[in-house]
Structures are given as structure tokens and as C-alpha cells.
Amino acid sequence: MSFKNKTVIITGASSGIGEETAKVFLSSGAKVILVSRNKEKMEASFQSYDANQYAIYPFDLSRLDDIDSFIDNIITKEGPIDILFNNAGISQVSLFEESDMTVIDQIMQLDYFSVVKVTKSILHHMIANGGGQIATNTSVAGLIPSRNRTAYSSAKFALHGFFDSLRLEVAKHHISITLVAPGRVQTNVGMNALTGTGIAYGKNDRGHDKGLSVEKAAHQIVNAIHRKKRLAIIAKWNDIAWLGVIINKFFPSFYIFLAKRINA
């Protein structure tokens, strides 16, 4: 893979999948714009790379009203953007009946509305530039339902509906859409997930430690972007995510039967 002479924006670039995909893009020759709230973490993670090959832009994506000016500022300073990888987000572990509406709003703001807003902000630049690619981390939770994930899953399902529809609109502008749906990947997604009251879940007890390494996940994601795949499920071949997607697609009633009994 080569992304030489390509400029990529990655949100949520300070850790996990965002950090590792950024490193793969850098190794493939791309110029990478790193976006995250944690400036210090990004500086520490990428200090061994050529400083001319990346740029750090600290920003809180929950500030929806400031996203337009933030993206305009990046493009003014860095030039046209070839690829946007919407990766930032936060997970959830809580029953709906035990979840405060403020927490549900927080998850929807970051996991759905900020993605839509960033995409909206960059879209007219890509159209004016003659094309581009938008990739988005949606999670397998956007393909199959599971207990304790009502807010998170609804945000991810919404992303699939949004981008599948947007794909039909922007093809004429030579803009491609790639949806990335990770299953279990070895990140701290569980540690950072929100409970119903908004505090951190603080545990990785949902099988992620047995999942795909974040390095392998990053290579699969960048490869899917390189190939301009419509949808890429990122997981070990024997991951429960694959089984869930297949059963839900062909035997939806049986999937619901299982999902009621298994905390997937």
C-alpha cells in the first residue's frame, strides 16, 4: 500500500485504533492530521516520526458548533484533504432503563452528530477538490443489536444509515465511502465506556483482551481504505462478531433468541 502525496485526517488519534491507523498511514507515505483532545498523548505517541509528515490539532469534537471553523482552519493550513477517517467515539455499558438521558445525549453527540458534522464540514472541500474518501469506524454494534448497548448501538446503526445514503449522493463527485466495523479488538474501549450515570465503566471484561491486536486491526482498516471497500468487518475469523453478523443476516429470529441469553 502506498498513500504517498495523500493527506489524511484521523479523529480520535491519541490512542487505540486511531493511533495505530495513523502509524500505518505514516509508514505508507501519507501526511497525517492527528485530531484528539489529548495533545500530550499525541505528541508522545508520534515523536519518533518525521515531524514534517504529521500535524497535531487538539480538539474536542463534542463542541459541535466549532467544528466548521476547526475543519476550515486545518484545510487553510494543511491544504486539501484526500481521506477522512472518522474514528473518535465512546462506548457504553448500561441498560436503557438505568441510563440517564444526559449520558445518551453525550454518546449521540460524539458518536453520531460529531461524525456527521465533521463529514459535512469537509464534504464541500472534497467536492471542490474533485473527489476524496470518507472512512468511518462504526463497530459491529452498528450491524447487530446486543444488550447493554442501546445508546451506543443506536448511534452506530445511525451511522450506517447515514453513510449508506450519503454514498448514493456523492458518487457523482468521485467521493467513496468506506465503513469499518470492528468486532473485538485489544483496546481500552471497555475501560473508557460510559455507564448509565456517565462514569467510566473501568473494565475490559467483554472479551476484547482475546480479540484482534490493535496493530493487526489497523493494518486491516488501512487496507480496506486502500481498496475502497464499502464495508469491512475487522475481527478474527473466529470472533463472535462474525458469527453474530452472519446469524443475524440469515436467521434473525434465531439471533434474537441467542442475544437475549448471551451478553455479546
Image: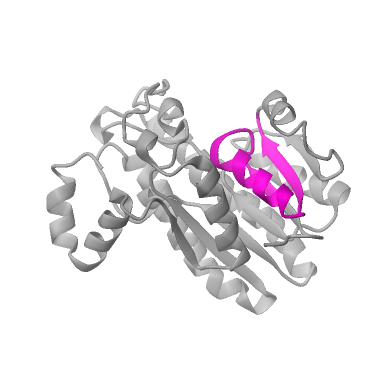
Quick check: can you spot residue 209? yes
Instruction: Indicate left or right for 239 with 90 as reference.
Output: left
Q: Which residue occupies the foreground of this view, 87 or 121?
A: 87
Residue farthest to the bottom?
Answer: 172
Q: Position of residue 3 (x, y in %)?
A: 73, 60
Considering the image in quadrants, where does the N terminus appear? bottom right
Position of residue 42 relative to residue 120, above or below, is: above
- Name the colouring of the figure: one colour
Query: Residue at left 62%, top 72%?
Result: 170
Q: Position of residue 181 (x, y in %)?
A: 44, 54
**Residue 63, located in which quarter of the rendered image?**
top right
Instruction: Indicate left or right for 245 with 114 as reference.
Output: left
Give the total of numbered labels.
0
Confirm whether the magenta stretch covers residue 242: no
Magenta region: which residues?
Answer: 9-37
Considering the image in quadrants, where does the C terminus appear? top left
Instruction: Indicate left or right for 131 with 13 as reference.
Output: right
**Residue 2, located in which quarter of the rendered image?**
bottom right
Query: Residue at left 33%, top 32%?
Result: 93
Q: Which residue occupies the foreground of this view, 89 or 187?
A: 187
Q: Position of residue 192 (x, y in %)?
A: 46, 27
Query: Residue at left 43%, top 26%?
Result: 191
Q: Position of residue 110 (x, y in %)?
A: 53, 39
Quick check: can you spot residue 12? no
Position of residue 261 relative to residue 227, above or below, is: above
Confirm whether the magenta stretch covers residue 13: yes
